[in-house]
Amino acid sequence: MKEMATANRSRRAKRLGLAVAIALTGTLVSGTATHARSPQKAKSGGEINVAIDGQLAGFCFSTALAGGTLGASRTIYESLVERSSNGKFVPYLAESFTPSADNKVWDIALRSGIKYSNGEAFDATNVKQNIEMGRGNMYAAGFNAKYASTGVGVNANIVTIDVIDPLKVRVTLDRGDNEFLGLMYRAGRYVMRAPAQIADPNTCQTNPIGTGPFMKQSYSPDELVVVRNPNYWRKDAAGVQLPYLDKITFINVKEASQRAAAVRKQTVDVGFFVTGDATFIKDLQKRKSVVTEYKSPQNQWGQWMPNVNKAGSPFKYQNCRLAAAFSVDWVLYNKVRFKGLGLVNGSIVGKENALYTKNGAPSYDLAKAKEFVGKCNTDLGAAAPFKVTLYADTSSQSQNNVKFVQGMMEKAGIQFNSLYIAEAAVLISKIYKGGGNDFDFAEGTPAEGVSIGYVIPFFLSKAFSATSKSPVAPTPYGKGYNTVIALGNHSDTTVDDKIYAAQAEPNPVLAKTKYAEASAYLMSQGYTIPTIHVGMFVFTNNKSKLKGVGKLLNPDGKTYPGVAETKGLDYTGIYKG
């Protein structure tokens, strides 16, 4: 078994306990090398098949992919920053990021000579276009209503994007942000799209055009076929054009049991799994003669967020939120459902994250849960008894995971409506939507890795502050998406004040203290419930003789992790031995 370093978040709740979305630290970083290390005896050519865990809903700004679907899309797309094997942000399509002293102005220098797979140039004008569309700026040239997405809320701190020269972009923020690179990485989702893809809102979802090593040959929600990008900008140290593989076919195999069988029986070359697939992961781990395992660290931080201000929500009452927080034994859940593959540390993040603290954190206590259920029912009055709805995707594993949690909550006296079941992409659209989350909980949120730049917006009461200078804030999109990212849908501005103070703090030591204080407040109020921290697992069948996993270097000369947070393998340097 090989263990490769990674860091974070999907953004989206896919399997119980799976959180998705951010990254790590960064201030001033730069890179100079343009080549990747050539794996020994690397061979060009060949095709592989990859079994992923969900449908590919599309490729435009409004679609948030997670897990294996995100990894499939990242064979086509690349981002301005990446992470090295030690978890640090490194420039990728960008060459350097230079902040002002107060972290309000960030200059992004881009690499030269990069083209999209269709031959269009990657330059500052295109980067500005991507950020403008992504933040829902209806005043920007080419914006279309179909581009409105959660990026409206995530990018709320951005005031202007200016083209300084063909290879330099300047981003000016409303408030200083010491975690800006985490925001720009966004768990690998802040990808750059070609002008031709953006130009047509009617085909943007189905016509992915990126700078990545592969390009689309064919697409349906259940199958994506990619082939070598003839315009790819990277070569290995020997001057060999990357990628090595000619073709990859990604296939949606929803049931983890079928995915595991496909890898084990060698009908696919690669299978992607999340911790919620623990039963089948544990089985594959015993078959070392048949498969090879690659895994990420447990740095996708698990939280559940009660939906405070949803119409009729019981969670507008703190007693109801705390009843839910004390009712679930996540240690037992990890043991039974995740087979011990997760991590429960009593906080909403890991120890390496600035938000880490156990102060204010509730932990399993059935007596306390019952006590708070009683108080909750008193608060609810005529609306009692305390009753909620949980959701799961269409896989049996996901449904069984959620039902296990339901069983524990029922022991505390919490009642339930029928389980809401839908394809993961449908669930995502209902959680991250204008007007706010449709469900009683957000079951898994996008906190991952050491950096929290992409996590901050999800804890706030609203995306745009009352004094926001963003041109998007007063628009219909700014108003409609003001609470879509704030998954807990609370209206407690004390949370905002604490997070903003930490975000703007230039002293890293003081910033960490302030972030921890904000985290303690969130947990003590029941706005965020700590659950299980998880990771990703990828298995390759040994007959395929896949080589080069995790061997390529980033353009800055640092090794790229073999399994990158929610994305799975980096296929750029993988070859058939």
Image: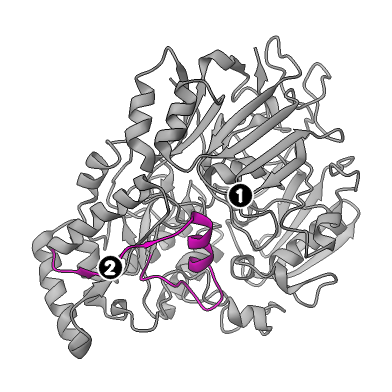
Between 455 and 210, the residue placed more toward the observer is: 210
Q: Which residue is mark 2?
A: 524
Asked if the stretch drawn in magenta spans residue 122, the answer is no
Residue 419 part of the magenta-drawn span: yes
Structure colour scheme: one colour
Q: Point out the image quarter for the C terminus.
A: top right
Q: Residue at x 58, y 16 (%)?
A: 544
Please tell me which residue lies in front, 351 or 291.
291
Residue 308 appears left or right of 54? left
Left or right: where 537 falls relative to 571: left
Rendering coords of residue 61 (x, y %): 68, 61
Identify the image quadrant of residue 314.
Answer: bottom left
Residue segment shown in magenta: 412-441
Percent x, y of residue 62: 65, 63
Instruction: Name the residue carrying label 1.
Output: 56
Name the one closer to the observer, 355 or 415.
Answer: 415
* Lower sequence index among marks 2 and 1: 1
Label 1: element kind: loop
